[in-house]
Amino acid sequence: MMGVSPITVRSWVNRGWLPANTTPGGHRRFIRQDVLDLVRQRGGQGPAADRQLRLLVVDDDAQFRSYMLELLAGLVPDGEIEQAADGFEAGIKVAEFLPDIVLLDQSMPGLDGASVCRRIRSAPQHAAVRVIGITGHLDRRVEQEMLAAGAERVLHKPLDVVALREALALA
């Protein structure tokens, strides 16, 4: 219904954005009206509102952005794809473009990916935006920083296309 991964829904519950009841077996159950209210709060945006999937690629490397735009055009041919070269531009694009998914590089000058992710997560109107971190650093600390900031997953460069498809829930 929301067009997001279970990890994202779990994150919404943990942040208090989506009420849930937990069964004795540990499964979460949702009241339909609560889900519809969340859709309404985010302006009816997203796949649940019968519009094209919107993706935002944020990376300071122009060559990598170009590669991602081409790759995503093939993976999501009906999607709308925008790009941002740094964290500041990403903030503007998130507010104006209203992406469903942000593919966010961690290492950028100015605002790094974790800072951008925290800003997205702190805005209730962007509660449903999925953030997938991307990093060229194989350091576990960098990955943990992105996850702690609210990314649902962190992918490593060079990008594994199968992992990207899975992260986008296209597999």
Image: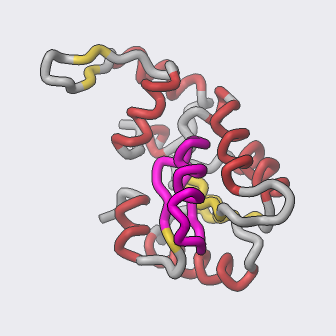
Q: Quadrant of residue 28?
A: top left
From the viewer's perspective, is residue 123 above or below residue 101?
Answer: above
Name the spot of residue 25 as percent of width and height, x first: 13, 23
- Residue shown at 38% from the left, 69% from the top: 163
Q: Is residue 154 inside the magenta stretch?
A: yes
Q: Provide residue 164's location: percent of width, then percent of height.
A: 43, 68
Residue 87 in percent (x, y) is at 79, 56
In the picture, the quarter occupied by the C terminus is: bottom left
Q: Is residue 130 visible?
A: no
Q: Which residues are magenta?
A: 130-155
Location of the N terminus (image quadrant): top left
x and y percent of residue 146 in the render?
58, 51
Residue 27 visible (yes or no)? yes
Q: Nearer the viewer, residue 34 or 114?
A: 114
> Which corner quadrant of the image does residue 98 belong to?
top right
| Relative horizontal placement of residue 151, taking residue 104 as reference (left or right) | left
- Residue at position x 36%, y 57% in the image: 169
Left or right, 103 with respect to 115, comes to left
Asked whether, in this view, residue 88 is left or right of residue 28, the answer is right
In this rendering, the answer to whether 152 lies above or below 68 is above
- The answer to if 10 sits in the magenta stretch is no
